[in-house]
Image: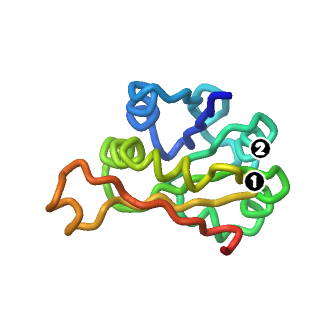
Amino acid sequence: MSRVYFTDRDLGKQFPRILTDAGLSVKRHADLFHQEGSDEEWLEYCGKNDCIAITHNSRIRYVPNEIAAVVRFKVRLLVVVGHATNAELAGNFVRTLHKIESLMAGRSGPLIVKVYRPTPTELLKSTYAPGRAEVWFPRP
């Protein structure tokens, strides 16, 4: 079965387009929800429809009603970390996808994984260096 990725509104149009161009199946927040909708609404959608949610909002992990929605709806949530353009974040996501999928293999939700960009040292070795992925919740 093919994975479906859902991109939160904070990732705009370019991030999901880059993922789609890389061959991933992507659903955008803007195509399904109003801009002003609550995070709980799309988290419920992702959990009930087995979509893997992607956000750039690293604070979502600390908002009680949002973390409760991740748990209640058994969401697999990927949080892309770092100050960069959405295009740079998407490029890193695609380069890091093998690590992300390996980390998620055999795991159901609730799950929160942080997706980091490569370090400056790694980028000096290769401008195409992948980042890393780490489980944030549940704590290993």
Q: Amino acid at mark 1?
A: Gly
Which numbered dot is residue 109? Answer: 1
Residue 72 in the image: state x and y as whole percent: 85, 56
Which numbered dot is residue 57? Answer: none
Q: Quadrant of the N terminus?
A: top right
Q: Which residue reaches farthest bottom?
A: 139
Which residue is more in the foreground, 28 or 2? Answer: 2
> Distance between the Cα atoms at labels 1 and 2?
8 Å
Mark 1 vs mark 2: in front: 1
Q: Secondary structure at mark 1?
A: loop
The image shows residue 126, relative to residue 35, as above or below, that is below
Q: Secondary structure at mark 2?
A: helix
Residue under the point 14% across and 62% down:
124
The image shows residue 46, relative to residue 134, as above or below, that is above
Mark 1 vs mark 2: which is more N-terminal?
2
Which numbered dot is residue 47? Answer: 2
Which residue is more in the foreground, 133 or 34? Answer: 133
Does 3 sit left or right of 88 as displayed? right
Residue 61 in the image: state x and y as whole percent: 64, 66
Residue 127 in the image: state x and y as whole percent: 19, 51
Residue under the point 47% across and 55% down:
80
Does 49 sit left or right of 55 as displayed? right
Q: Amino acid at mark 2?
A: Gly
Mark 2 surroundings within 10 Å by alpha-carbon count, few (fewer than 14), some (14 through 19), many (20 or more):
many
Residue 21 in the image: state x and y as whole percent: 39, 25
